[in-house]
Amino acid sequence: MDYQFFVSLLLIMASFGLYIGIALYNKARATSDFYVANRSVPPVFNGMAIGADWMSAASFIGMAGTVMIMGYDGLAYIMGWTGGYLLLTFLLAPQLRKFGRYTVPEFIGDRYQSNAARLIAAVATIIISFTYAIGQLSGSGVVIGRLLEVDAAIGTLIGVVLIAFYSALGGMKGITWTQVAQYLVLIIAYLIPVIFIALQLTGNPVPWVSYGEIVGELKALDAELAISEYVVPFTENTKWQFMALMFTLMAGTAGLPHVIVRFYTVSTMKAARWSGAWALLFIGLLYLSAPAYAAFSRFILMTEVAGSSINNLPAWTTAWVDTGQLSVADQNGDGILQWGELVISNDIVVMATPEIANLGIFVIGLMAAGAMAAALSTAGGLMISISAALSHDIYYRSINPNASDKKRLLVGRWSIIIATVVAGLVALNPPGAITQIVAWAFALASGSFFPALILGVWWKRSNGPGVIAGMLVGLSVTLGYIFAAKYGGFTILGIIDTGAGVFGAAAAIIANIVVSLLTKEPPQKIKEEVTDLRYPEQMTYKNGEVWIEEAD
């Protein structure tokens, strides 16, 4: 165990040193570096950074565990998160890049010519990013807690210190190149175990092909134990919840401020589209592997752990019980651990599987480093979004428009430090599982930013009063439904708190359209700017005609 601890610690510390070194080398020295990496990131590397930003602790740590426990119903997470990138890449990212602002609230304020709308959007950015960050810091606590064999709360505090340091130092420029390194670490860490487990269980090292064989065996085991079948849909939730969750994650993806701002770091609309294409490829490597991971983990637990003597369980169980993420109890007193007596958190399945499959200390350590990379990469991007909302959209645009670059950088860095510490304190006692907390952030984004951005780009008639009404109504409905469903047991058609975004988005779109139609139209100049966003960068819409400015 000591040797395993040493190897894991060495791999994690080496990766930490790499991230800090990159941040120091790419230290932000101007506001354009801090907010948009000087718009100079090549599309393929931006795609990697997007992938790392996107593949958070929820994706790396929680997704396979959610699918393992929920079965078919857990696929809503994979389909929703992947589909959302298609919406973002084709309907929003290139257009927002052409508009040429630093942040999403800045786009909303200038597109709708409303300072009030910009301030509301800045507050919404802080709320959404803060909620999402709680999930990431909670994930880092799970990883560090297991590594050091301490409570997850102590692990969370260690993660807070690291994230606050390299995020505040490097800004978007430093975080972008740090995320490229983090993507390479996390995808290697994710693929090596699942490939070796596939080889171990099926003799085929291609998990995306071979895991179907294991799913067939799981069906037989489910029938034998008389439990819910793994591949039967809508056993955990209703079909309406499945569709609502999928929509919430898709619309939320297209409206998340920390994801959208990644498309601002490239030089052109074309580069933004290519960034999205590369990101889908890099993200697909993990998302296509998660169902295989889930099937393999469930199979090993059902065949090699369940049914064992309670006094002769594998050594790995003791370490995970100490973290509070695993519970084993001989409830019927027969001395045998039954499947129903094994309670495993969604959030430890991926982390524990290399130990469960006895893949060796190097793979276990590599998995720990990958999980930390996933949690840190997304948390860093979220902190930049919160910092930009506070220092750029609120402080610079509303409080002190004459602030120097040095002053704005100082405010931005302190914003990151304070936000990370506060989010870390909340993450010490998280209000739900990682995937659940992250789903709330997506619900809030789908009820606020998604309608504002879609209508802002594709409906010229949408105006300032309309977007203000839409964001306020959307946020209120989404928050209200989350609290009513989670704490009051209130649901519509079986849709629980994680699917709240479908109601928020619908309410926001209706409010935006109704109020826009009842109030004054936007100026003709704004209408032409909106129409102009839909054309490639070489084309400009002027006076009712499309002008080609240069050859492609």
Image: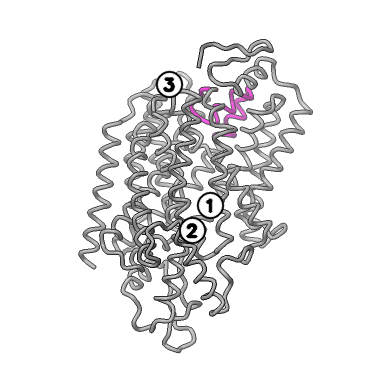
Left-right relation of 170 to 273: left
Given this view, does label 1 or label 3 mark the residue nearer the observer?
1
Mark 1, residue position: 78
Where is residue 360? Give x, y as percent.
27, 64
Residue at 45 percent of width and 56 percent of height: 208
Left-right relation of 464 to 38: right
Where is residue 443? Give x, y as percent.
60, 47
What distance separates the C-alpha of mark 1 from that of mark 3? 43 Å
Mark 3, residue position: 403
Name the secondary structure under disc 1: helix
Examine the image and state in which quarter residue 525 appears.
Answer: top right
Where is residue 447? Give x, y as percent.
63, 42
Q: Is residue 530 above or below residue 89?
A: above
Q: Nearer the viewer, residue 130 or 307?
A: 307
Q: Is any atom of residue 154 visible in this view?
A: no
Could you say which disc has been placed on residue 196 in the image? none
Q: Earlier in the sequence, mark 3 or mark 2?
A: 2
Name the secondary structure under disc 2: helix
Mark 2, residue position: 291
Q: Over which residues does the magenta segment extend? A: 99-122
- Magenta includes 109? yes
What distance separates the C-alpha of mark 2 from that of mark 1? 9 Å
Examine the image and state in which quarter residue 418 appears.
Answer: top left
